[in-house]
Amino acid sequence: MSEADKSLLIKRYASRRLYNTETSDYVTLDDIAAFIRDGREVQIVDLKSGDDLTRQYLLQIIAEHESRGESMLPVPVLNDIVRSYTNQATGFMPQFLQASFDMLRDGQSKVMENMVNPMSTVPGFDAMKAQQQAFLNVMTGGVAGKAKEATTPEPEQEPMPEPQDEGLDEIKAELAALQAKLSTLGK
């Protein structure tokens, strides 16, 4: 297991200071947030009692970001979360949120894989580039005050390929499965 894959253990002392057991130094909430952004899993435990305090500190990190104006959670979503504590949604809300974030993470990784040269994958990009070049040739000839004929031949118009729905069917299937799971959990 690589260093980045194992959970980073942070111990909270009685003085409420947080101690990184990996580097043997004290850390702040901002440091912990940076570890998480870097892909590390973090576990925070109370040194004396052994209680797991991870959830409490993660919520505190989120609250601090939200209070600094780094709003990621719209008020209607926060209202829905509060409502879910008072009704039957508490049973399936954690699974729903986890499945939603898993789908988001998977989608982001697929987008990043396709980001090698994003414009080259756009259907008709080469034809559009050739048209832009022809347009610029005509425009620069007119701006220079010379009414010369365009020396570049018209680009051949290749038919625009049909948009590819890569992964769309897969996403639809995942969404249908999630909806089916939610409907069974709600019963």
Image (tube, rainbow, N blue to C red):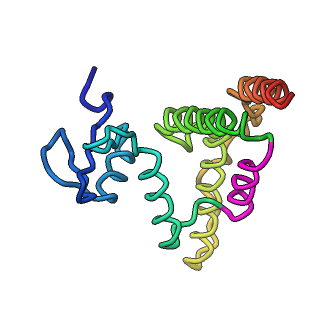
- Which of the pair 97/126 is nearer the observer? 97
Q: Residue at x 62, y 69 (%)?
A: 139
Please determine whether, in this image, residue 124 is positioned above or below residue 63: above
Please determine whether, in this image, residue 51 is positioned above or below residue 145: above
Q: Residue at x 75, y 28 (%)?
A: 178
Residue at the farthest left position: 24
Quadrant holding the C terminus: top right
Q: Residue at x 58, y 55 (%)?
A: 133
Residue at the farthest front position: 49
Q: Is residue 34 left or right of residue 121?
A: left
Residue 49: within the magenta? no
Give the quarter of the image for residue 155.
top right
In the image, residue 6 lies at what x, y percent? Answer: 31, 28
Question: Main SS type for the magenta part?
Answer: helix
Please determine whether, in this image, residue 127 is positioned above or below residue 113: below
The part of the chain drawn in magenta is 74-87
Q: Is residue 69 left or right of residue 162?
A: left
Residue 86: within the magenta? yes
Q: Is residue 72 left or right of residue 168?
A: left
In the image, residue 151 lies at what x, y percent? Answer: 59, 55
Q: Is residue 76 left or right of residue 26?
A: right
Give the quarter of the image for residue 74.
bottom right
